[in-house]
């Protein structure tokens, strides 16, 4: 388990783009389960959509990517610093099955499929309750900044 204080130490993201509130389970090098509480106060709901607020799909993917980054740092036994960052390298097979609305809890299950030469491939599924909201294969890379 990891609370918001630990997440803030591990991820460089901050409001309004930090999209992981709590880590529920983690097996370093294997899998992670994390939670995003979706509230009406999210800044994107003002325009997406005013008459029926829905979390943008790209932000669901970002929440899964941040969850994957937490798993990557756990696998490396490291955290972010001023010299390294994890970037998206690719997204495959993204599917959106259900809208995510204010009041929902988005639970991201991300597993590490493989890691080679600093490139990580993950399988991610985001659920609300038992329903799949989003799923995708994510590729990320850790880069050292000059």
Image: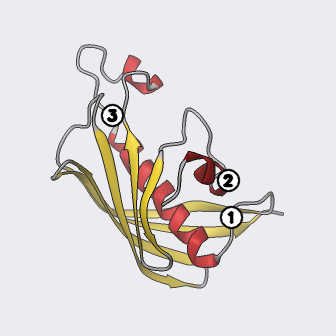
User: Alpha-carbon distance for marks 3 and 2?
Assistant: 26 Å
Mark 3: secondary structure: loop
Q: Which residue, given by chain and number where applicable, does mark 3 sit on? A: 55
Residue 74 versus residue 85 in the image, above or below: below
Image coordinates for residue 31, horizontal then vertical, percent: 40, 73
Whether tag 2 and tag 1 are in contact, CB under 8 A, the answer is: yes
Image coordinates for residue 64, horizontal then vertical, percent: 41, 55
Q: Which residue, given by chain and number where applicable, does mark 2 sit on? A: 9
Q: Which residue, given by chain and number where applicable, does mark 1 sit on? A: 79
Q: Is residue 81 left or right of residue 87?
A: right
Q: Which circle's residue, 2 or 1, is located before the other in the chain? A: 2
Residue 46 versus residue 78 in the image, above or below: above
Q: Is residue 111 left or right of residue 68?
A: left
- Considering every residue shown, the one lying at the far top of the view is 51
Image coordinates for residue 82, horizontal then vertical, percent: 80, 57
Q: Which circle's residue, 3 or 2, is located before the other in the chain? A: 2
Whether tag 3 and tag 2 are in contact, CB under 8 A, the answer is: no
Q: Residues within 10 Å of mark 3 (few under 14, many from 20)?
A: many
> What residue is shown at x 61% (from left), y 62% (from top)?
86
Which image quadrant is residue 144 in? bottom right
Q: Which circle's residue, 1 or 3, is located before the other in the chain? A: 3
Q: Residues within 10 Å of mark 2 (few under 14, many from 20)?
A: few
- Considering every residue shown, the one lying at the far right of the view is 146
Of residues 32 and 137, the one nearer the viewer is 32
Of residues 44 and 104, the one nearer the viewer is 104
Mark 1: secondary structure: loop
Image coordinates for residue 20, horizontal then vertical, percent: 48, 47
> What residue is shown at x 54% (from left), y 62% (from top)?
70
Q: Residues within 10 Å of mark 1 (few under 14, many from 20)?
A: some
Residue 22 versus residue 52 in the image, above or below: below
């Amino acid at each position: 388990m990891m609370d918001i204080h630990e997440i803030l130490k591990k991820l460089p993201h901050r409001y309004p783009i930090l999209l992981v509130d709590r880590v529920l389970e983690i097996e370093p090098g294997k899998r992670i389960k994390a939670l995003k509480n979706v509230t009406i106060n999210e800044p994107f709901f003002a325009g997406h959509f005013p008459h029926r607020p829905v979390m943008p799909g790209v932000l669901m993917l970002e929440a899964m990517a941040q969850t994957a980054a937490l798993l990557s740092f756990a696998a490396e036994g490291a955290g972010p610093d001023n010299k390294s960052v994890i970037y998206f390298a690719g997204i495959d097979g993204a599917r959106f099955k259900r809208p995510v609305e204010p009041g929902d809890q988005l639970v991201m299950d991300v597993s590490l499929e493989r890691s080679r030469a600093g490139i990580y491939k993950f399988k991610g599924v985001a659920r609300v309750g038992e329903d799949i909201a989003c799923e995708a294969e994510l590729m990320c890379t850790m880069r050292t900044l000059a």
